[in-house]
Amino acid sequence: GAVVSQHPSRVICKSGTSVKIECRSLDFQATTMFWYRQFPKKSLMLMATSNEGSKATYEQGVEKDKFLINHASLTLSTLTVTSAHPEDSSFYICSARDGSAYEQYFGPGTRLTVT
Amino acid sequence: GQQVMQIPQYQHVQEGEDFTTYCNSSTTLSNIQWYKQRPGGHPVFLIQLVKSGEVKKQKRLTFQFGEAKKNSSLHITATQTTDVGTYFCAGLRYNFNKFYFGSGTKLNVKP
């Protein structure tokens, strides 16, 4: 099946710094990528939809200036958490979709801890 | 907001017992997907349902999509310890390009 990688898998940063998370589709071209946030024992909360070459579409309540998303190519999307605070600590997961197919392929996730 | 509800939140069963999780949407869905997330892992796609009243089977798993395309269920027959994990439904609304996940049902199977 299609493979999506995410880097880093874990990151610890200090409050006030920025962290970039990469999401890559390894063996297919992802026209659309999604970024989710998952709190412990909770469901996946969709943060934004990222389309290659255009601005990301953010869900209600998600600050676009805080969570910067760039989808520069058909295989790479990045999420930058700017001026991170402890409440931003969470599990961030990306998923990618191949063209018109609706199946999503999920990355392994990134555990962010802000101290 | 996200409007896909899922019950129950948790289910503990003895190995060999059946298990069912239900997903309900306040709006009609274009299609629905089911995912399984093992502890410490990421969601893995199981199946997609598109047609009203559709029923699909994967070995011991049976997936149904309601006639009104507002609800869905996943039934596991004779659970095994390998079925442990959290099962999520994800609904796609018409004219939307994204899926909204249900709250998930965490299944624990006692050997």
Image (tube, coloured by chain):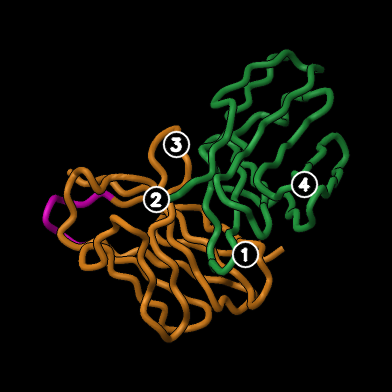
Chain colours: A orange, B green
Where residue B35 appears, x then y in whole percent?
64, 46
Q: Chain of mark 2?
A: A
Is residue B66 depicted above or below B60 in this figure?
Answer: below
Answer yes or no: are tags 1 and 2 on the same subunit. yes
Left or right: where does residue B111 sit relative to residue A69?
A: right
Q: Chain of mark 3?
A: A
Where residue A10 appears, x then y in whole percent?
37, 50
User: Separation of disc 4 and disc 3 at Cα?
Assistant: 29 Å
Q: To which residue does mark 4 refer?
A: B67
The three-letter code of the residue at mark 4 reads: Glu
Left or right: where does residue A64 sit relative to residue B47?
A: left
User: Separation of disc 4 and disc 2 at Cα?
Assistant: 32 Å
Answer yes or no: are tags 1 and 3 on the same subunit. yes
Magenta stretch: give its range: A12-18
User: Separation of disc 4 and disc 1 at Cα?
Assistant: 34 Å
User: Separation of disc 2 and disc 3 at Cα?
Assistant: 10 Å
Q: Badge 4: how crowded within 10 Å, few (<14), some, or many (20+)? A: few
Identify the residue at the far left of this view: A16
Answer yes or no: are tags 4 and 2 on the same subunit. no
Where residue B62 appears, x then y in whole percent?
82, 38
- Tag of residue A3: 1
